[in-house]
Amino acid sequence: MEFQQEIRGFLMSRRARITPEQAGLPYVGGNRRVKGLRREEVAMLAGLSVEYYTRMERGQLGGASESVLDAIARALQLDDDERAHLYDLARSVAPGSRRKRPERTSPITASVHQVLDSMSVPAVVQNGRLDLLAANDLGRALYVDLFTMAGQPPNLARYVFLDPRAEAYYIDLEEAKDQVVAVLRATAGRDPLDRQVTELIGELSTRSTDFSTRWAKHNVRRHSRGRKVVHHPAVGRMHLAYDDFALPGDPHVSITTYTADPGTPSADGLTLLATWAETQKQPQKQPQTAHDEVRPDRPRHP
């Protein structure tokens, strides 16, 4: 991912979505050639010169102070996730930022597996690429389609955009796709030197025009908590709340848990999911063949 191109696309997309009226600027009649705010209007709102803001929108964010970044964030009405993304992009072009990052050790220790196994709700460990790195039995049961995918580790982005089973699993597949793209966009901005993230984005862009179209919108979101509705192939529809808990050693790898409101059909669904998960662990009994069958008129031999 080209850093300057990413900065340009993000700032232009945020500028295009704000009308002068939304920014509190006086109404001026006539046709506007630019959708949203003009560069000079953003510069004025941020208290910057037009030349300086133009250079920044062209990708020259390196060296920008926090006060300047905050001023741009206010002018463009960025939310918390978008503001964090802007700071990540600025760091990506700061002097010395392109040094090779050290190799990370896996934060999924034996104690993490013990924590997962002790949970009575579905739980998975995922990273910013949306790889499912570990799971308890209920987590594997909840995402049974992903854990049977050919590529390992299972990846939510590949599932949502490339696996036809996702259409039946997600009640609102469009929302799921938007969220996946926004999370990947935030991940890519946070760690632009992550080769695996770049390769995943390239793969999805090549194999899915749907992904490419959504990627071009430059929306960002940090995966932390929310709600989703799924239709499990064995249990049926469930309304679930999810929460992320960052693991020590890598704040971008987290345990995600899934719960349902007590006394609801979805809570009953999770109970049924646990029962179904137990049946999947039991070895399947093989039917006897005619050769193995013991007939009552034939004596047994020791």
Image (tube, rainbow, N blue to C red):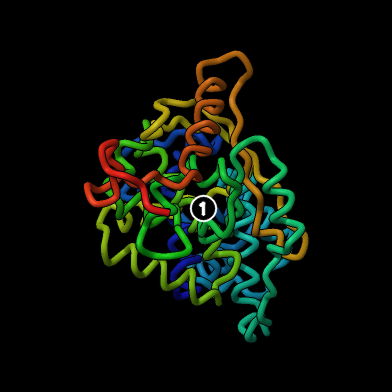
Question: For numbered disc 1, what is the local secondary structure?
Answer: helix
Task: Decide if residue 250 is on the left or right side of residue 271.
Answer: right
Q: Look at 69% across and 74% down and name the residue there.
A: 105
Q: Is residue 183 visible?
A: yes
Q: Is residue 47 visible?
A: no
- Residue 19 is drawn in which quadrant? top left
Residue closest to the eye, 277 or 75 = 277
Residue closest to the eye, 17 or 193 = 193
Q: Position of residue 37 (x, y in %)?
A: 45, 47
Question: What residue does disc 1 label?
Answer: 183
Q: Position of residue 21 (x, y in %)?
A: 48, 33
Q: Amino acid at mark 1?
A: Val
- Residue 250 is drawn in which quadrant? bottom right
Which image quarter is the C terminus in?
bottom left
Q: Position of residue 187 (x, y in %)?
A: 55, 61
68 vs 177: above or below: below
Q: Look at 40% across and 45% down and name the residue there.
A: 284
Residue closest to the eye, 193 or 15 = 193
* Residue extending furthest toward the top: 263
Task: Decide if residue 109 is on the left or right side of residue 19.
Answer: right
Which image quarter is the N terminus in?
bottom left
* Residue extending furthest toward the left: 290
302 vs 171: above or below: below
- Marks counted in the figure total 1
Q: Position of residue 72 (x, y in %)?
A: 61, 54
Task: Decide if residue 249 is on the left or right side of residue 3.
Answer: right
- Crowdedness of circle 1 by 10 Å Cα count: few (<14), some, many (20+)? many
Q: Look at 68% across and 47% down and name the residue there.
A: 117
